[in-house]
Image: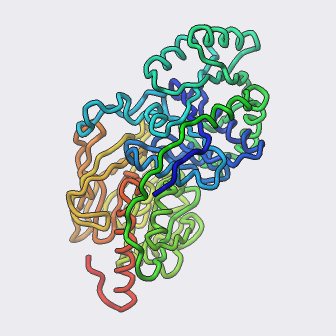
Amino acid sequence: MIDEVTIPRLVVAGVCAGTGKTTVTLGLVAALGRRGRIVQTYKVGPGFLDCAYLSHASRRPCRNLDAWMLGEEGVRRSLAHGALGADCAVIEGANGIYDGHGRGPDEEHGAYPFPGSTAELARIARSPVILVLDAAAMGETAAAIALGVRQLDPRLRLIGVVLNNVACDHHRRLIEDAIWGFATLPVLGALPADKACGIPELHMGLLPVAQAPRIDAAIEQVADAVERHCDLELIERLMAAAEPLPGVAAAVRPTAEGEPVRLGVAYDDAFCFYYPENLELLQEAGAEIVPFSPLEETLPRDLDGLYLGGGFSDVFAGRLSANHALLEALRRVHAQGVPIYAECGGLMLLGRSLRTADGTVHEMAGLIPVEVATRSATPRAGYRTLRLMEDCMLGAAGVRLRGHEYHPCSLVGPGTLEGTRPRPAWSVHDSDGEPLGCEGWVEGDLVASFLNLHLGQDPSIADRLVGRMRETGRLRRAGGVVPA
């Protein structure tokens, strides 16, 4: 049983994308850190990019709170587990505060009317909310927006507003008086319209943190602005008024038996999209995480399994293709029966080739008989419901899982290696229940897909993965044949 959570906390929400909630969140996290607080950060929904910046600002892994993939109990477990050792928590919302995924066919009548939204997450987390409004092109109309957000769900604990891109003191006073007079909400802060007071890298197509050389200076500038223009004393008092979150039952899992397995995890600028809970659950199941850089290294020795996550494989396609030692090592361990689980960028690495937007074709490992091409069009994105097509190390045929995809790539001319035909990993529906066909690849102990899974939805997935790695490792060391 995980004890009751009483940590002070706050959700930072917006009325749409681009209002500045990431800037405000980063500034608030850094400013609280200056006051000696240990801040745990969270991100609503499945996104990885904002998480990297929030982790950088807090110096703690940022965790995803995703009600659709994890369910209420999973969200509360993740929030409680992440809060261990922290003084307070700051949760960055996603999109507009009531924007979710729509109601799927399997959701019960009478459920929360905005499923998957920041508002739903705030309800589950019993957390107060501040609303970020971009005031650059508005005056008193800001009060109508704040009032509408407050009235749409009267149970939402909306405690105040932070204005972004305020032109001057008169502009702030004009909006502040209107918001208090009509929406009865305080303005807790107002950041000036100053290009130096922002995170310029945080726009569509975020860079890896390591590729954003100004990030530390930008966060410091935003923290300065939050300290000067926000009422941090009041914000902290409001955070401390968050309702206690009831304890939740810990997921029941079998005790890991046998020797630990060595799990190679690709991690560098090209492979950096991992849910922290995924790695933690794998460790709890008995995996020793062995990080390595596909950009700089070959595979570590004596691995029992591989986990190739998402990231920016397309950006670094040339360097990955030029790492011949790595590609040959991938072919060798696959031939030896080492289990490999690959998501998105990992699938690109394991395909025959990756064609980038400039038309260049980069040869890859060739473990999967497909070619991948990047597209200039809108990325393919959204929540997905999955049904396993056949037994594999993730589960038995027919098992249903939930995942998410966000990528600019597609398969082009999926071919067949000699004696091999494509075997999809799962059938896929979107969050509204519309069928999207089949996706992914299964071959023995290799599972690859464009989709990302959060193992917190069913921790037994981690147990099965590690169990299979342990089983195949024993067979290889004994000189036996690993069954496909």
49 left or right, relative to 372: right
Image quadrant assignment for residue 447: bottom left
280 left or right, relative to 200: left
Which residue is at a point 55% across and 62% down the rendered structure image? 267
Q: Is residue 413 among what the camera can see?
A: yes
Which residue is at a point 52% across and 70% down the rendered structure image? 289
Q: Is residue 233 above or below residue 405?
A: above
Which residue is at a point 54% across and 27% down the rendered structure image? 14
> How is this picture coloured?
rainbow
Q: Position of residue 142 (x, y in %)?
A: 58, 13
47 left or right, relative to 220: left
Q: Is residue 312 among what the camera can see?
A: no
Comparing 285 with 5, the one in front is: 5
Comparing 81 with 143, the one in front is: 81
Which residue is at a point 56% across and 32% down the rendered structure image? 128
Position of the N terminus by quadrant? bottom left
Image quadrant assignment for residue 146: top right
Q: Is residue 326 above or below residue 454?
A: below
Position of the C terminus by quadrant? bottom left
